Amino acid sequence: MKTPARHAPVTKMLTGIQGFDEITDGGLPRERTTLVMGGPGCGKTVFALQALVNGARQEHEAGLFVAFEESTNQIIANAATFGWDLPALAKKKLFLLDARLSPEIVKAGEFDLIGVLTLLQAKAEEIHAKRIVFDGIDVLLGLLEDPVAERREIYRIRDWLSQMGLTGILTLKAGPIDIEQRYGFLQFMVDCVVILRHQVVDGSAFRNLRVMKYRGSGFSGDEFPITLTAEGLRLTNRGPTDLQYEVTDERISSGLPRLDNMLGGGYYRGSNVLISGAPGTAKSTLSGLFAAAACQRGERTLYVSFDEGPAQIVRNLRSVGIRLAPHLKSGLLTMYSTRTRGPNVEDQFGELRAKVRGYSPRCLVMDPLSALSTKMAHLASADAAQQFLDFLKKEGVTVVNTSLMDGLTTDEATATGISTIADTWIHVSYVVQDGERNRALTIVKSRGTGHSNQVRELTLSSDGVTLTDVFVAQGKVLMGVARWEWEQEERAAKKRSQVATDLKRLQLRLAQAEAAARLQVVQTEMEARSAEILVLALATGSASKLRVTDRAVLRKMRHADEEVRVAKRTGAKGAAPANGDGGAH
Amino acid sequence: MATAAPTSMATLRATRAGLLLRLYIAGNAPNSLRAIANVKAICDEHFATRHELEIVDLLDHPGRALADGIIVTPTLLKLLPLPVQRLIGNLSDRRQVLVTLGST
């Protein structure tokens, strides 16, 4: 068997299929043959047709579509469901050939494809085609009934493509066993092999795509989930996605002022918020508050519910003082309720994406996202959720998701993986204590913002929703009646302490007064003593002076010395009672 | 070798003859050459003078493939007698060819 030497480096042809061009680093090999295999309903025809349509529309490359299995009318109708207007393209950029062999045809010996290739050559030259699809070559190969002939015709197509400078996509319908056995040889004959697979998990269909071979190029050989969206086939790429998006410092209210305070001003615009908690922990109420606040700011809001109808949500929220009805009427709020349809949530996210594109809300509520995520065990679903949230982020939509976390996986276990994507995660749990069940709200995390680490009690009443401080006493967090009792007790204790303080103050004032009084007494006493001292001083001072004066007078009067002696003698006799001092010199 | 479109003369003759055939071939591809040989042999043997055969080479007339809906080569069209029937292949399966052409 001949294998033409191919030394030229592989150049690539963009398919425009979201995700596929990334995993193949540029699309399909140009001027080479790609084989797309898979069971019925895998999306082979869509894949091939999409590459043609995108080529015509985006790359201005004309294309040929050779249909061996379906009529061209069927193909046109199918394409219309993806919004591809084939008749419009068919004027210049696209040629559809109905190459079905009628069932009445009689085979009488070996045949070849030279006829159709001749036809296609003429057509390709006419419209300057660059791409060509042979859709359903299994039908043709089946008629050949001979492996040697099959190989020969595939080679014929391949070499013809090469000569013509056309990039070819052959689609072939085959189950997994046939792909390996019956058509195993084909994989060696072409340059690129793409396998599509249809798989049913829990009653839901999943489609996957895998590049099995790509001659001359690197590629990701993993299996990737694919979705048929309203715009065509889309491949979910788990690889590094573009995480570029605008961020803003703008804060918007959660609808609950105290929660805004806890978050340092509210949610960031464009962030995504996860509210998790057990059933009945007011997750929907918090979502409703957010929606109502958004509408009050005049922002378009989309409320998506997966477990309740709009009327029921509106009624329930009204019971806690949240009024959505006026916003519904004004058109600011749109509510969309749907049931989850099994584990394949890709389609549903596609639907939501279309809704967001169509309505362009600034705020979005998804209640509960876990309805989608219960089967998030399947990687594709978690991917789909992540992709959707990334999409919302790029659109700048602020989104509040709720997530059910039951008792088993409670608290801060990341049941869904969504928690890692969430920018702000608020958890509401039940605290059962003293025969009561109360709601405790905490902020588990909040990216890019300081936030309170405190637990708050969330109370609901017909007046609305309030957050209250909780009390910690004797190592226990007090809520509900216990908190109320504690508050009462604390108030009484405060009163008691107030009175006691007042009493103490009085007592002290009394003591002070007593001391002051005592001080007065002592001072007065002091003054009295001073007076006494003075009196005494005065008294003794005058007496001695008199004596001295008197003696002097006497001496003067006696004029004599004898008197001194006499006086000495009398002094020796101790007759003088006082002041026999030296004062008499 | 007649490669032109069937003339009304040919149709008239075939009507008289009872069998009008048209064989689409692709140049001198092996299957095409074999088909020509086979169809001629069968006609000579079973239909003698009562047939008219037109051969269309698609390499010369690529437009005919599209116009006549020819996908594989060789393709033999039995235009008359009605109903129109279509045979594909190099016509080596002689029994199948005879059944289809209604030699009996």
Image (spheres, coloured by chain):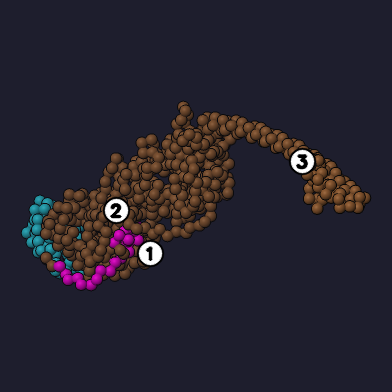
Chain colours: A brown, B cyan
- Which amino acid lies under the numbered mark 2 shown in the image of this protein? Phe
Image position of B83 (left or right of A419)? left
What residue is disc 3 on?
A526
Q: Are marks 3 and 1 in contact (CB under 8 Å)?
A: no
Image position of A430 (left or right of A72)? right
Image position of A387 (left or right of A521)? left
What residue is disc 1 on?
A58
What residue is disc 2 on?
A224
Pinpoint the chain carrying mark 1.
A
- Which amino acid lies under the numbered mark 1 shown in the image of this protein? Gln
Report the mark closest to the observer, 2 or 1: 2
Q: Is residue A208 magenta?
A: no
Image position of A259 (left or right of B55)? right
- Image coordinates of residue A467 in percent, x first then y, are 54, 39
Q: Residue at x 35, y 50 (%)?
A: A383
- Label 2 SS: strand
- Which amino acid lies under the numbered mark 3 shown in the image of this protein? Met
Q: Residues within 10 Å of mark 3 (few under 14, many from 20)?
A: few
Q: Residue at x 46, y 35 (%)?
A: A475
Q: Residues within 10 Å of mark 1 (few under 14, many from 20)?
A: few
Q: Residue at x 37, y 62 (%)?
A: A89
Q: Is residue A33 above or below residue A145?
A: below
- Image coordinates of residue A359 in percent, x first then y, are 49, 50
Task: Examine the rendering and report whether any part of residue B7 can be seen.
Answer: no
